[in-house]
Image (spheres, rainbow, N blue to C red):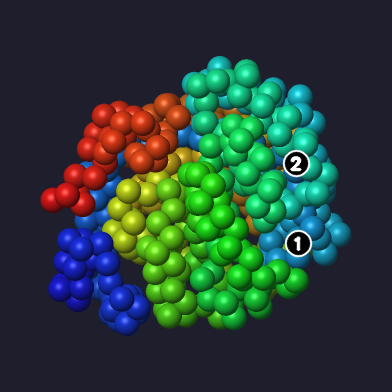
């Protein structure tokens, strides 16, 4: 186990059998060392900075029927909403005034937001906030759509692969194709986006072998952003009685992903904070370096219910921003309000925006 952990840290790689063995025999002592090495690796690439992204959840309509998601089209009890372009811009305006220079526009797969509407929205944001980065997280679209939105000024695209097991993916996503999901990620990379992928921990039927496949998929894809969070059951889905994922298991996946893809930007997710009051801080202590406070209007926040009992639903935007900063500083990190680009996209070879050596660990 010590040899495997040293290999993971020093070479940033393990094969599938090694990952499975490591997960099956991980002790509390080795887990602490795993987290420590993950933090050291993150520091070599991004120092002690935690980057903020302002999250705007602008539509809860979704054409897909994923078994685990509260926004699934079969959930007739879900309260649906769409923000107007002006409402989205107002959210961004408020966030910009609070210092945010990175915005994530997220929704279900809502056909109302056509290519033309999204282009107009992105262009409007670029005019109002020329020094801010824009990320879209709106699901599977065509290559032409992705190219058009990139040309309009979109910087990043988040599309979690959810699980790298074809059979598990198909069982959880009726009517969807694992091959198409993966193809979308490769198209986004080829176009030039900063791409985000990731998966859930604790899905029904998920095994150590599946988790190993997830980690190796990330290693091969080498996305700029990696989002890993626990599966949280929703009462209006077919998986309502499933046990759900655990914070501790998710932390292990976060740390291993950090060591396998050392230069990734990794959010400490709201789901971690939902399951554990200090879950986001624990995620930072396992290798994460991004937080995504919600900028959506209070009137619609509870309606964007991928899962239930989500935190920060009643906090005003300014209060949420202040709370996040206090948490980051109290945990011993530095709040970073720049665009927070991946170090390969800053325009300064080998450096992050704060001037730290991005590839120091690799070169050593």
**Viewer-nearest of discs 1 and 2:** 2
Q: Residue at x 78, y 49 (%)?
A: 110
Residue 116 is left or right of residue 23, and the answer is right
Q: Would you say 131 lies left or right of 208 here?
A: right
292 lies left or right of 76: left
Residue 113, x across and y down, in percent: 78, 42
Which label sits on residue 64?
Answer: 1
Residue 71 lies, with reference to residue 51, above or below; the image says: below
Q: Residue at x 53, y 37 (%)?
A: 155
The residue positioned 60% from the left and 28% from the top of the image is 317
Task: Tell me, yes or no, whether the two marked residues, 1 and 2, touch with CB atoms within 8 Å.
Answer: no
N-terminal-most mark, 1 or 2: 1
Residue positioned 36% across, 31% down in the render = 347
Q: Looking at the rendered structure, which numbered label has been put on residue 313?
A: none
Q: Residues within 10 Å of mark 1 (few under 14, many from 20)?
A: some
Q: Please state the horizontal and vertical placement of residue 222, each as a whole percent of the image.
A: 40, 56
Q: Quadrant of the N terminus?
A: bottom left
Q: Position of residue 363 (x, y in %)?
A: 17, 49
State the SS at label 1: loop
Residue 265 seen from this side? yes
Q: Quadrant of residue 123?
A: top right
Q: Quadrant of residue 258?
A: bottom left
**Disc 2 marks which residue?**
115
In 3D space, how far apart are the residues under numbered discs 1 and 2 (Cα atoms)? 18 Å
């Amino acid at each position: 186990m010590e040899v495997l952990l040293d290999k993971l840290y020093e070479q940033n790689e393990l094969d599938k059998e090694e990952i499975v063995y490591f997960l099956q025999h991980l002790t509390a002592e080795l887990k602490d060392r795993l987290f420590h090495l993950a933090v050291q690796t993150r520091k070599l690439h991004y120092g002690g900075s935690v980057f903020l992204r302002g999250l705007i959840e602008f539509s809860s309509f979704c054409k897909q029927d994923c078994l685990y998601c509260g926004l699934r089209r079969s959930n007739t009890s879900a309260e649906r909403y769409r923000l107007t372009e002006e409402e989205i811009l107002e959210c961004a305006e408020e966030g910009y005034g609070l210092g945010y220079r990175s915005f994530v526009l997220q929704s279900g797969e809502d056909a109302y937001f056509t290519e033309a509407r999204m282009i107009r929205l992105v262009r409007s944001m670029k005019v109002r906030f020329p020094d801010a980065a824009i990320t879209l997280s709106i699901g599977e679209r065509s290559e032409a759509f992705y190219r058009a939105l990139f040309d309009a000024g979109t910087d990043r695209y988040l599309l979690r692969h959810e699980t790298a097991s074809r059979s598990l993916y198909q069982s959880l996503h009726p009517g969807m194709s694992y091959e198409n999901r993966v193809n979308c990620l490769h198209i986004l990379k080829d176009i030039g986006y900063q791409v985000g992928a990731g998966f859930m921990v604790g899905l029904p039927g998920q095994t150590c072998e599946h988790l190993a496949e997830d980690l190796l998929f990330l290693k091969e894809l080498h996305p700029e952003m990696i989002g890993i969070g626990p599966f949280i059951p929703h009462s209006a889905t077919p998986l309502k009685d499933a046990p759900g994922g655990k914070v501790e298991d998710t932390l292990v996946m976060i740390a291993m992903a950090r060591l396998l893809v050392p230069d990734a930007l990794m959010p400490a997710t709201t789901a971690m904070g939902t399951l554990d009051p200090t879950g986001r801080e624990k995620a930072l202590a396992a290798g994460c370096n991004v937080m995504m406070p919600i900028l959506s209007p209070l009137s619609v926040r509870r309606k964007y219910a991928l899962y239930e009992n989500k935190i920060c639903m009643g906090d005003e935007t300014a209060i949420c921003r202040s709370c996040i900063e206090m948490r980051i500083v109290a945990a011993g990190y530095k709040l970073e309000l720049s665009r927070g680009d991946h170090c390969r996209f800053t325009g300064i070879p080998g450096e992050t925006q704060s001037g730290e050596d991005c590839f120091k660990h690799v070169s050593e």
